[in-house]
């Protein structure tokens, strides 16, 4: 590693640390959570642009994103553990910060590689796989926490053994009908469905990325088996709630992730004439050959 690389890496960590400190300060002093979310988006976007333009390498955006995500997770854990606390309250805006600190650099670099006609910048393929594997590790820990430590709990009692337990959305539909009839808010059930679906989106996306070489039937088996394993483990260990609704909602989220992959890949095939997971230099050598 040369002196310039060390200097850029130090600058990345310093600016990322300042950005994180500002996020914490805004979260603490400003009760309107949209302010810290907006700041995180703008700051992460500006830093991603600065790091890429100053280094001409995507690798420093990985350093930035990983530093921000790790520090944000540490902050989230600390705030969660000290609850209840009148001065520093835990809410889902911290989860949004963690996601945004990963998503913004990832999406920004994907767009820059899509529009790059040079190639002006280096190592997007390495950046993509590093970011993906880093996210998968965080995702696995999130699955462990949300399925087996603090599992999803629906706003209605678990149905007894019978049709409601095996017919998708039968219990959920009954709850919605009752809520509408009694003028209750549907927000709890909407949030419950959205949370599980959101866990399915990354699985669908990254399974499509890393299993695309497998035959379609094997891919389909993986999509069907993984959420089933989660529900079966919950059911037999008692650490969560194994339910057919959760299984189907997770699969719907996985379908959304697959669609996101297809859209992203179609854009790269249309504008960059290559699969976005294919290295640009490899593609150019193939075309020259």
Image: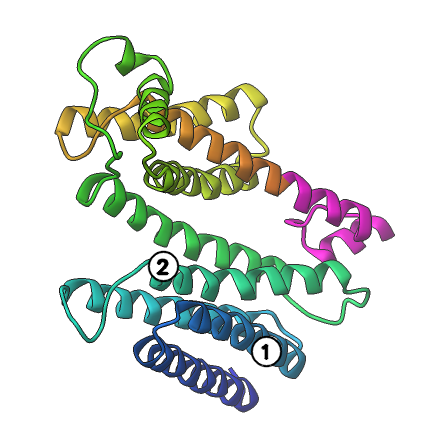
Residue 63 seen in render? no
Pointer 1 residue: 46
- Residue 91, image x, y percentages: 29, 60
Applied colour scheme: rainbow
Q: Which is more N-terminal, label 2 or label 1? A: 1
What is the spatial separation of the Cα atoms under label 1 and label 2, in whole angstroms? 21 Å
Q: Residue at x 39, y 38 (%)?
A: 190
| Mark 2 residue crowding within 10 angstroms, few (<14) / some (14–19) / many (20+) | few
Q: Which residue is mark 2?
A: 95
Residue 56 visible, this orientation = yes
Disc 1 secondary structure class: helix
* Residue segment shown in magenta: 262-289
State the predominant SS element of the stretch in magenta. helix
Point out the residue furthest to the front here: 182
Q: Position of residue 123 (x, y in %)?
A: 63, 65
Measured from the top left, where is residue 130 in percent x and y?
A: 49, 59
Residue beneath the point at 30% across and 20% down: 171
SS at mark 2? helix
Say which of 127 and 220 sits in front.
Answer: 220
Quarter of the figure with residue 51? bottom right
Tell me: 37 left or right of 106: left
Relative to 47, say whether 239 is above or below: above
Q: Is residue 199 magenta?
A: no
Determine whether, in the image, residue 283 is placed left or right of residue 161: right
**What residue appears at the point 30 percent right and 13 percent down from the top-left corner?**
166
């Amino acid at each position: 590693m040369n002196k310039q690389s060390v200097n850029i890496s130090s600058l990345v960590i310093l600016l990322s640390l300042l950005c994180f400190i500002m996020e914490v300060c805004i979260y603490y002093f400003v009760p309107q959570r949209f302010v810290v979310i907006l700041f995180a988006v703008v700051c992460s976007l500006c830093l991603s642009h600065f790091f890429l333009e100053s280094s001409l390498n995507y690798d420093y955006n990985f350093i930035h994103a990983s530093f921000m995500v790790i520090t944000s997770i540490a902050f989230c854990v600390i705030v969660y553990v000290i609850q209840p606390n009148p001065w520093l309250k835990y809410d889902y805006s911290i989860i949004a910060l963690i996601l945004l600190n990963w998503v913004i650099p990832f999406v920004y670099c994907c767009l820059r590689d899509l529009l790059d006609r040079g190639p002006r910048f280096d190592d997007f393929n390495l950046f993509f796989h590093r970011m993906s594997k880093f996210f998968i590790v965080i995702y696995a820990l999130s699955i462990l926490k949300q399925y087996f430590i603090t599992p999803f709990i629906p706003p209605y009692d678990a149905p007894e053994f019978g049709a409601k337990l095996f017919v998708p959305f039968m219990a959920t539909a009954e709850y919605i009908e009752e809520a509408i009839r009694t003028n209750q808010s549907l927000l709890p059930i909407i949030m419950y469905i959205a949370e599980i679906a959101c866990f399915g989106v990354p699985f669908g996306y990254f399974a499509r990325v890393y299993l695309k070489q497998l035959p379609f039937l094997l891919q389909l088996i993986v999509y069907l088996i993984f959420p089933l394993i989660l529900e079966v483990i919950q059911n037999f260990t008692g650490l969560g709630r194994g339910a057919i609704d959760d299984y189907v909602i997770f699969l719907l989220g996985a379908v959304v992730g697959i669609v996101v992959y297809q859209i992203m890949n179609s854009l790269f095939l249309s504008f960059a004439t290559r699969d976005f997971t294919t290295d640009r230099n490899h593609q150019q050598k193939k075309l020259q050959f």
